[in-house]
Amino acid sequence: MNGDIWWKYQTGGEIKSSTVVDPVTSLVILGSHDQCLHAVKKKVWCTMIGHSSIFASPCVSSQPHLIVCATLGGIVVALHGTWKFKAEDLVFSSPTVVDNVILIESNDCHFLFEAEQSNELKTDTIKNGTKQKNGKVKKFVTFASTDGYLYIVDFCSGEIVLKHFLSGQIFSSPVVYDNCLVVGCRNDFVYCLSIE
């Protein structure tokens, strides 16, 4: 490791998403404002998802093997799967997978997709007081919204545990480290909130 560039790759637009590595194929997957999802070692494939830029980082699950991508136009697709979904609003946040459930937030709501081996698509939305999934283990997920709210949701029940307002739009994905939730905000601050 000496800092030399081993290879580089040019897309047809800006890259604002983070890259992910597919553990099955070892390909580097990234979205671009050229409206395409790219898989690279050098260049392996490039596919147009919709007629809208890809701002969110793609997500890869290994069981089942899916590459999940969302566009600013609200299109959510699972490559290697058989489904495509159209949200009613923009999707800025990156999809994530927890226990074979794909979590995606659009500007209008939060979606849950069951990622089963059959690749059947089951959708639901998180709303106050609704039951989404039965389970015994307490797990929480966090979402940020462009309306400035940060949410912590009980993964098993779907209930909103905490809704906290930050004084600006939130386009970044929150990160949990130790007992801290870290998120950037459009008011030019990075917040580190203690969670217990």
Image: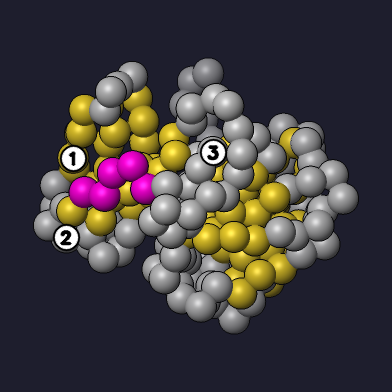
Secondary structure found at label 2 = loop
Marks 2 and 1 sit apart, C-alpha to C-alpha, by 11 Å
Q: Quadrant of residue 87?
A: bottom right
Q: Could you tell me which residue is drawn at 42 percent across and 53 percent down?
A: 129
Percent of width and height locating residue 152: 35, 42
* Left or right position of 109 against 24: left
For label 2, the crowd category at 10 Å Cα-Cα, with few meaning under 14, some 14 to 19 and many 20 or more, is some
Question: 8 left or right of 77?
Answer: left
Q: Nearer the viewer, residue 33 or 143?
A: 143
Horizontal and vertical percent for residue 195?
A: 26, 28
Residue tagged by mark 1?
Answer: 191
Question: On the image, which quarter does residue 196 sit in?
Answer: top left
Q: Is residue 113 above or below residue 179?
A: below
Q: What is the C-alpha distance between the residues marked 3 and 2?
A: 29 Å
> According to the image, label 2 marks what residue?
168
* Of the image marks 3 and 1, the number of the one nearer the N terminus: 3
Q: Amino acid at mark 2?
A: Gly
Residue 89 can be seen in this image? yes
| Chain part drawn in magenta | 160-164
- In the rendered structure, are the residues bearing label 3 and label 1 in contact, judged by CB atoms less than 8 Å apart? no
Q: Gap between marks 3 and 1, in whole Å?
A: 26 Å
Q: Position of residue 130 (x, y in %)?
A: 48, 54
| Front residue of this view, candidates 16 and 106 | 106
